[in-house]
Image (spheres, grey):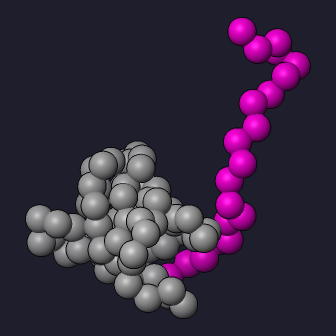
Amino acid sequence: MMPATERKHINRPARWDFTADITILDHGGRELFAKLGNISEAGFMAEAEETVLAGSIIDVELPDRGPVRAEVRWSQGWRFGCQILPS
């Protein structure tokens, strides 16, 4: 067990707050509109008009990056976080 004064540090890529409208296409063919909340080299967080399930693979066109495929790593209500998959 870790002492109370010791904290576990997780290295994460830098994130930038970034607001933009995006369109998501899931592999069931469903098209959803979402608002990007932040972005990093490895992923992004967004809020969609409907729930996006963790584990889903989605296609999205990101501003200044173009089309990417991503895995939804977490989902809470309409907010979700994705890891960008290698091309």
Horizontal side of residue 45 vs 24, given as left or right: right
Q: Position of residue 31 (x, y in %)?
A: 20, 75
Horizontal side of residue 14 vs 80, given as left or right: right
Residue at (76, 14) in percent of width and height: 2
In this rendered view, identify the residue nearer to me: 15 or 76.
15
Residue at (72, 9) in percent of width and height: 1
Q: Position of residue 87 (x, y in %)?
A: 39, 75
Main SS of the magenta part reads: loop
Q: Residue at the left extreme?
A: 28
Q: Residue at the front extreme?
A: 87
Q: Is residue 30 above or below residue 80?
A: below
Q: Position of residue 78 (x, y in %)?
A: 36, 55
Q: Position of residue 6 (x, y in %)?
A: 85, 22
In this rendered view, identify the residue nearer to me: 20 or 12.
12
Q: Is residue 24 above or below residue 73?
A: below
Q: Residue at the right extreme?
A: 5
**Is 12 in the magenta?**
yes
Horizontal side of residue 5 vs 53, given as left or right: right
Q: Residue 24 appears in which quarter of the rendering?
A: bottom left
Residue 71 visible within the image: yes
Residue at (82, 15) in percent of width and height: 4
Horizontal side of residue 13 vs 37, given as left or right: right
Q: Residue at the top extreme?
A: 1
Residue at (21, 67) in percent of width and height: 26
Q: Which residues are magenta?
A: 1-20
Q: Is residue 19 above or below residue 8?
A: below
Q: Is residue 8 above or below residue 16?
A: above
**Is 79 in the magenta?**
no
Residue 22 visible within the image: no
